[in-house]
């Protein structure tokens, strides 16, 4: 009965450490509550903007328009920068055609660049639009055809889009773009009419469908947040997924001064950034399979005849490159834009480690070598902790003969055995749990590194050596198909690559250097753990597997060196091995 209890305890403890940490973190580090997280139906106060910009959706069963046809069916101006290429649709002033030139869809160098934005009506439509809402004024809509001041938007050639209604009220959108991923829209309304009007500028993002790896909620459940996200009143909010917005009557509202909102994918981001001094109303909306993020000032502005209203916002459309996001956050005063990368609860560890990894990559020019360098630095930083763990292990080994004697003496009286063991630990000043503390201290570091190696676009499509052509993908070689010699792809749950196998082997070697549990069932459980983790880690990125393998190798080297400094302990290990071999020989005879 006790053996079964110990087995269950060991399995539950292992599962808790491997998979339960995010839940533990959520309890001790609760997610900040959103500023406002429900849509209201009360009437808007006088002068307040309604923020009622509707989702632009095609009919539910409409046939998707081919991308080439959509791009050729309307007048456009070109967009060209070192990192972006595409066009702006003059119908509706939509930014709906953007390719990321420095990121490819596949590993091959001749593969197509990643498409971020696509026109409305296409299969994966995703676009941004800047416009106005108001009373007493005819505003341009998504069918309005604008007049451009030029035919190409580049970092050196801004373009202004203009449209005038029948009352001589003029609307201008001055678009400029930098060399990375930021588009600035300065919106001007000039009241050429005869009566005052109430008006406010808005910006929206609309996308059709969800990414394949979208999450239904915050990062507590999935470790990576993919979906609606924003920063409201300088508080990052990861609480809403696509399904959450759908289930909240299709709409989720926030109020904030400044901030930003949009859709974050694993590597890409579309974000609307309002004026940081303006109180705004922000919403996520869902209608069928069309999702929208929108932002509008909380109050309309009255514009007298002959007067103008100047306002503006920004659009980030590109890759979540940490250096770029960090520069925008600091130089443009955009709060927490770098938190579009969901660093998790241990951001204070993850971010410094990322910069170390980034520096090492610049030094070595190889991301695999950078990971190895980071591993050595981390293990060096953890060396004092490893020493304490080793000291605890040494103490446990020293008392093992006495523990074995107690087990033999009280093998039929479990309660008395427990009492005698506690007394022995107290007399020998041994803490049997002291060896667990270093492991617990390493958990935050592991999860922080897990985030870095899983989310860093800097590692995407980066090679290491030989068969490891992409450290952001799982190890591709597996002995199941004789390392690719047999013409079939094994199922993912048994496609164990070389790095996961090395991970299992190095963990097994580490266990050989540690004192074995006294309980036979626990011995069996811990004996299985390296091979269990080998299967668990197989689907993860090769970069993370490489880190763990190297960490194990460095740990083995550290333990070997510490054993060399403690010959008595090494002799005890040798005696234990001899006794174990003798016991096996006796059992066979």
Image (spheres, rainbow, N blue to C red):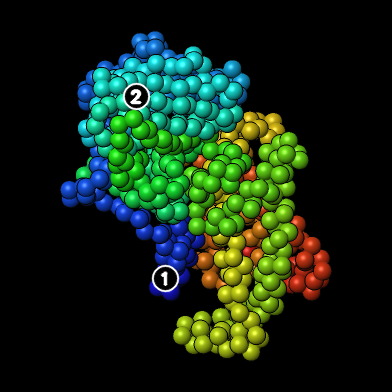
Going from the N terminus, do you reach mark 1 or mark 2 first?
Answer: 1
Res. 562 in view: yes
Seen at 68% across and 49% down, the residue is 356
Quadrant of the image containing the C terminus? bottom right
- Residue 442 is situated, as x and y percent measured from the top left of the image, at 60, 61
Seen at 44% across and 40% down, the residue is 273
Residue where numbered disc 1 is placed? 5
Q: How many discs mark residues in the rendered view?
A: 2
Seen at 66% across and 65% down, the residue is 514
Res. 118 in view: no
Seen at 34% across and 30% down, the residue is 306
| Residue nearest the observer in this picture, 406 or 385 | 385
Quadrant of the image containing the N terminus? bottom left
Viewer-side label of 1, 2: 2
Q: Quadrant of residue 117?
A: top left
- Residue 32 is situated, as x and y percent measured from the top left of the image, at 40, 59
Q: Is residue 570 left or right of residue 243?
A: right
- Residue 447 is situated, as x and y percent measured from the top left of the image, at 54, 54
Residue where numbered disc 2 is placed? 170
| Residue nearest the observer in this picture, 456 or 48 | 48
Q: Is residue 565 left or right of residue 144?
A: right
């Amino acid at each position: 009965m006790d053996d079964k209890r110990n087995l269950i305890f060991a399995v539950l403890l292992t599962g808790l450490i491997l998979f339960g940490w995010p839940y533990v973190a959520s309890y001790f580090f609760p997610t900040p509550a959103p500023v406002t997280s429900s849509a209201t139906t009360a009437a808007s106060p006088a002068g307040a903007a309604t923020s009622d910009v509707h989702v632009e959706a095609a009919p539910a069963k409409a046939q998707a328009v081919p991308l080439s046809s959509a791009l050729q069916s309307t007048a456009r101006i070109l967009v060209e920068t070192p990192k972006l290429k595409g066009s702006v649709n003059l119908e509706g002033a939509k930014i709906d055609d953007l390719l990321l030139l420095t990121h490819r869809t596949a590993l091959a160098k001749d593969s197509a660049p990643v498409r971020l934005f696509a026109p409305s009506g296409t299969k994966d439509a995703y676009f941004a639009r800047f416009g106005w809402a108001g009373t007493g004024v005819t505003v341009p809509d998504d069918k309005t055809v604008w007049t451009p001041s030029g035919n190409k938007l580049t970092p050196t050639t801004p373009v202004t889009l203009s449209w005038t209604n029948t009352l001589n009220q003029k609307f201008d959108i001055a678009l400029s773009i930098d060399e990375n991923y930021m588009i600035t829209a300065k919106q001007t309304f000039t009241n050429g009419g005869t009566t005052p009007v109430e008006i406010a500028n808005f910006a929206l993002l609309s996308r059709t469908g969800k990414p394949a790896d979208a999450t239904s909620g915050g990062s507590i459940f999935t470790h990576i947040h993919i979906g609606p996200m924003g920063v409201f009143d300088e508080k990052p909010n990861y609480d809403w997924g696509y399904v959450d917005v759908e289930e909240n009557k299709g709409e989720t509202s926030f109020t904030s001064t400044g901030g930003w909102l949009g859709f974050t994918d694993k590597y890409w981001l579309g974000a609307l950034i309002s004026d940081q001094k303006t109180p705004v109303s922000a919403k996520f909306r869902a209608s069928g399979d069309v999702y929208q993020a929108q932002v509008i000032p909380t109050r309309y502005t009255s514009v007298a005849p002959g007067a103008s209203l100047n306002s503006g916002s920004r659009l980030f459309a590109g890759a979540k490159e940490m250096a770029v996001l960090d520069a925008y956050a600091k130089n443009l005063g955009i709060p927490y834009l770098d938190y579009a990368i969901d660093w998790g609860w241990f951001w204070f560890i993850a971010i410094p480690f990322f910069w170390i990894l980034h520096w090492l990559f610049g030094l070595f020019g190889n991301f695999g070598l950078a990971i190895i360098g980071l591993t050595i630095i981390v293990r060096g930083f953890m060396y004092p902790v490893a020493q304490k763990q080793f000291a605890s292990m040494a103490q446990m080994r020293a008392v093992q003969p006495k523990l074995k004697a107690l087990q033999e003496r009280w093998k039929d009286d479990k309660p008395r055995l427990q009492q005698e063991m506690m007394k022995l630990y107290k007399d020998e000043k041994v803490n049997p749990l002291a060896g667990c503390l270093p492991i617990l201290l390493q958990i935050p570091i592991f999860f922080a590194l897990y985030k870095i190696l899983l989310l860093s676009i800097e590692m995407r499509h980066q090679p290491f050596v030989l068969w490891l052509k992409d450290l952001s993908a799982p190890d591709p070689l597996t002995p199941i198909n004789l390392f690719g010699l047999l013409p079939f792809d094994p199922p993912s749950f048994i496609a164990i690559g070389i790095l996961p196998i090395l991970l299992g082997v190095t963990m097994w070697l580490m266990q050989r250097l540690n004192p074995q549990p006294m309980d036979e069932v626990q011995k069996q459980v811990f004996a299985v753990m390296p091979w269990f983790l080998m299967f668990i880690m197989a689907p993860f990125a090769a970069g993370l597997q490489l880190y763990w393998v190297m960490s194990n190798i460095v740990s083995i080297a550290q333990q070997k060196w510490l054993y060399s400094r403690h010959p008595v302990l090494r002799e005890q290990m040798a005696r234990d091995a001899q006794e174990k071999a003798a016991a096996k020989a006796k059992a066979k005879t």
